[in-house]
Amino acid sequence: MTGWIIAFGIAILAMVALCFIGRIPRVTREIVAAALLVGLAGYAWQGHPGLAGAPRKVASEKDAQFDEKLAERRRSLAERYGPAGQWLIMSDSYGRRGLTKEATNILLSGLKQTPEDANLWLGMGNALIAHADGVVAPAADYAYRQALRLDPEGPAPRYFYGLALAQAGQLDAARKQWLPLAQSAPEGSKIKAELQANIARIDAMLAMDPAAR
């Protein structure tokens, strides 16, 4: 518990110092906040406050489980070319080798150059989910919300945010992301059929277990 108090205290003090003493621009504050959240997320996933230190096994290429289908879906819904493309390709290359921390850091570097790129924030959310083994930590939630803010009409932020929430068991929240996307998707499209099927499954699960909301 003490470790958490110290970690959050340092993060808050750092943000206050940079914003009010360092007087960093507003756009830069978002990147600083993301970096601090990434640090706290890493502490949550890899650190164990109050326990003795122990070496952490580094993922090898054999251990890596990169989701190629998920990456292809991201490319079909969001970026394929443009400024975000090069950063996402590099990030994916690290992800394929199980180097999820490095994959996240690559995207953080891209966001320092183009902080208003929705595709990079989306990629950051996905990379953080992979790094956390499916946990929607505050850093990933922040990244997805930034993508939604920057591209509120785009299908990719809602699709992947909903997917992350559903996989984490937050069914009602996932449904709220997917429903408007399913309603606006073209008739007869694969994405519409997929989302309608997913929503139907969520509705059935919620009917069986209202506590899942």
Image (cartoon, grey):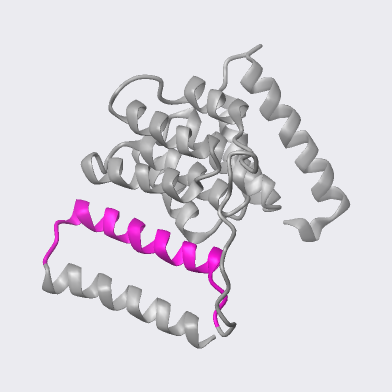
> Magenta segment, which residues?
23-49
Above or below: residue 22 compared with residue 166: below
The residue under the point 84% across, 42% down is 204
Left or right of residue 211: residue 143: left
The residue under the point 69% across, 25% down is 194
Q: Nearer the viewer, residue 154 or 53?
A: 53
Q: Position of residue 110 (x, y in %)?
A: 29, 40
Picture quadrant where residue 34 is located:
bottom left
Left or right of residue 68: residue 124: left
Q: Nearer the viewer, residue 95 or 138?
A: 95
Residue that extends furthest to the bottom in the rendered view of this protein: 2
Q: Position of residue 5 (x, y in %)?
A: 45, 84
Residue that extends furthest to the right in the rendered view of this protein: 208
Picture quadrant where residue 81 is located:
top left
Left or right of residue 101: residue 85: left
Left or right of residue 77: residue 108: left
Above or below: residue 213 compared with residue 161: below
Q: Position of residue 189 (x, y in %)?
A: 63, 14
